[in-house]
Image (cartoon, grey):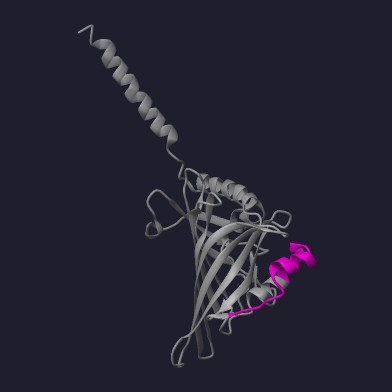
Amino acid sequence: MTRHAPLLGASLALALSASVLAQAGKADTSVKAVVSAAAAYVESYNAKMQYVLADEVATQRLARAHAAGVVTRTTKADLFITFLPAESAWIAARDVREVDGAPVNDANNIRAMMERAPLSRLGAVVAQKNAQFNIGSISRTFNEPTLALLILTDKHRGRFKFDVSSAAEAKEGRVTIAFKEHDRPTLISGTNGAPVYTSGVFQVDPATGRVEFTRLELSMETVTAKIETAYAEDAKLKQWVPALMRETYMQTARGFEETINCESTYTNYRKFDTSVIIK
């Protein structure tokens, strides 16, 4: 008996150590901890997502009540994305190369615009450029795949309430956090400058704070909108990037009904420089 006692003690000690390590390695899934981890991840992510290009293929579908058929448009573009630290804002500019199979020659591309003015002053020009091939009557200039990440930055986070989302939103190993904007200045404004309050969800890896999915919803006057972005790991950039964005816009006013659905995919990520594109 005395010969086996040390072995039993060692086994017990190992079991306890494993249990302690398992508990220590378990991620805190409370709302406060997950939001804090996601905010730290986004702060680091914003610094890494500087001057990035991706190939965007976007298909829009427009349907109107009492109108026959669905109108479609497919565009292929270079999507330029960067985070502007001083403004705590994203800028996303599309250089459309092709519309429904027909080539587009655009001398006013992002490189040319950056040679004329700093990015921080190009917001209105970029918004107009991004909307030039939109179909339908709904004005939409905020369809950036990374837009929802701004909610987790220090500049905006304090205006939002966060909570654990419903079980229907759950994904194994991830925590889904719901958010709702409750104060001004709002993340998005209407065409007349009126505040537009947003809500939605984040899917977060609680161990790393990595945001893997976002959904942003809003309503302004007669229009409702939903933008969803799914992220995936990119081997070239060695980080998670937008892979798919789905947008839904609905307008109902005085018997007029319009729905626009858009699906955009993003591939071939690479770094961008004002003098050279690094493949």
Total numbered circles? 0
Residue at 61% x, 47% y is: 44
**Location of the C terminus (image quadrant):** bottom right
Judged left or right of residue 14, residue 258 is: right
Judge whether 252 appears above or below 80 on screen.
Answer: below
- Where, by quadrant of the figure, is residue 157 drawn? bottom right
Q: Position of residue 6 (x, y in %)?
A: 28, 11
Q: Is residue 12 visible?
A: yes
Question: Looking at the image, is 8 positioned above or below residue 182?
Answer: above
Question: Which part of the image, by quadrant, shows the N terminus?
Answer: top left
Considering every residue shown, the one lying at the far left of the view is 1
Query: Given the current orientation, which residue lies at the most extreme right position?
Result: 116
Query: Is residue 202 visible in this depiction of the protein?
Result: no
Q: Residue 268 appears at what percent x and percent y? A: 54, 60
Say which of 58 and 222 sits in front.
Answer: 58
Q: Where does residue 267 sit, x and y in percent of width and height?
A: 52, 62
Instruction: Say if the magenta span includes residue 154.
Output: no
Depth check, front residue: 246 or 103: 103
Would you place residue 197 above or below residue 131 in this image?
above
Taking the spot 71% from the left edge, 66% from the top edge, the residue there is 111
The residues colored magenta run 103-124
- From the viewer's perspective, tell me whether residue 252 is left or right of residue 94: left
* Residue located at (23% from left, 6% from top): 2
66, above or below 108, in the image: below
Residue 110 position, x and y percent, is 69, 68
Snapshot quadrant of residue 10: top left
